């Protein structure tokens, strides 16, 4: 069994993935894991209310609160340290994670993207824009991807993907709802596999391997 995961969830929005992970923990689906901290850059994030309900320490941290990006990153790293975080789960965090953080938590940061990467990923591809692009492409399938985060947008090793058909009648909104349902299944599943050692993040992967 790998070392226990002490997770910080980073979320800027509604927090439905955060909630799905909490549910999976409460049902015993994910073991060997605690969410020790929630971080948001949005004081209105649903994630803050979710954290409060579940007595998870939460912090609202923005660059604007600090004199420099450096000071912000230091404060963030300090908070992660204070809470003994050893794993970061990005769940709709609308801000690029600084390389300083990625380096410190190398192979210990995961993200979920609402499409089948490498398609429909990269800078500017977030939220409804992703689903609009999928519909415009006339692709017959979309889906969700959980991946490791490295210093480039949406480019880290893919850990799990699941697809969903795109129906001719789908709008970006209906597609988003279908994809979100999949996200709520595969994100807890990936964390479960990591916590149980079924996915090993530290080993070198041969090119093209999942
Ligand atoms: C999800 O669609 C996720 O793929 C993307 O941001 C959205 C977050 O939704 N990265 P929620 O805040 O978890 O409801």
Image: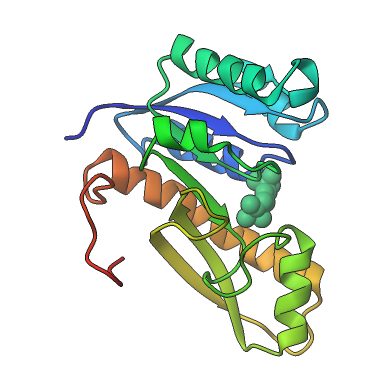
* Picture quadrant where residue 209 is located: bottom left
Whether residue 163 is situated above or below residue 183 in the rendered picture: below
Question: As rendered, which of 207 and 9 lies closer to the eye?
Answer: 207
Report the coloring of the rendering. rainbow
Quadrant the N terminus occupies: top left
Question: Is residue 56 visible to the viewer in this orientation of the structure?
Answer: no
Q: Residue at x 49, y 55 (%)?
A: 185
Extreme residue in the left direction = 1
Q: Is residue 21 left or right of residue 43?
A: left
Whether residue 194 is situated above or below residue 127 in the rendered picture: above
Residue 199, percent from left and from top: 26, 51
Question: As rendered, which of 29 and 175 lies closer to the eye?
Answer: 175
Total label count? Answer: 0
Question: Is residue 145 visible to the viewer in this orientation of the structure?
Answer: yes
Q: Is residue 37 left or right of residue 166?
A: left
Question: As rendered, which of 115 and 106 lies closer to the eye?
Answer: 106
Q: Residue at x 71, y 87 (%)?
A: 137
Residue 97, percent from left and from top: 59, 39
Q: Residue at x 61, y 66 (%)?
A: 121
* Picture quadrant where residue 179 is located: bottom right
Q: Residue at x 70, y 86 (%)?
A: 167
């Amino acid at each position: 069994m790998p070392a226990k995961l002490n997770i910080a969830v980073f979320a800027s929005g509604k927090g439905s993935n955060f909630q799905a992970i909490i549910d999976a923990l409460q049902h015993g689906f994910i073991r060997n894991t605690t969410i020790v901290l929630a971080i948001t850059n949005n004081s209105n994030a649903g994630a803050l209310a979710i954290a409060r309900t579940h007595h998870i320490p939460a912090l609202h941290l923005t660059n604007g609160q600090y004199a420099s990006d450096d000071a912000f990153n230091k404060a963030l790293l300090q908070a992660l340290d204070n809470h003994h975080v050893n794993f970061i789960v990005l769940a709709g965090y609308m801000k690029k994670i600084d390389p300083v953080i990625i380096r410190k938590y190398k192979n210990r940061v995961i993200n979920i993207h609402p499409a089948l990467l490498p398609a429909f990923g990269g800078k500017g591809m977030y939220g409804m824009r992703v689903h609009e692009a999928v519909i415009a492409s006339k692709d017959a399938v979309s889906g969700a991807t959980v991946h490791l985060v490295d210093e480039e947008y949406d480019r880290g090793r893919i850990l799990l993907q699941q697809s969903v058909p795109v129906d001719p009648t789908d709008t970006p909104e209906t597609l988003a709802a279908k994809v979100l349902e999949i996200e709520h299944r595969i994100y807890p599943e990936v964390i479960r596999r990591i916590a149980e050692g079924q996915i090993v993040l530290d080993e070198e992967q041969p090119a093209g391997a999942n």
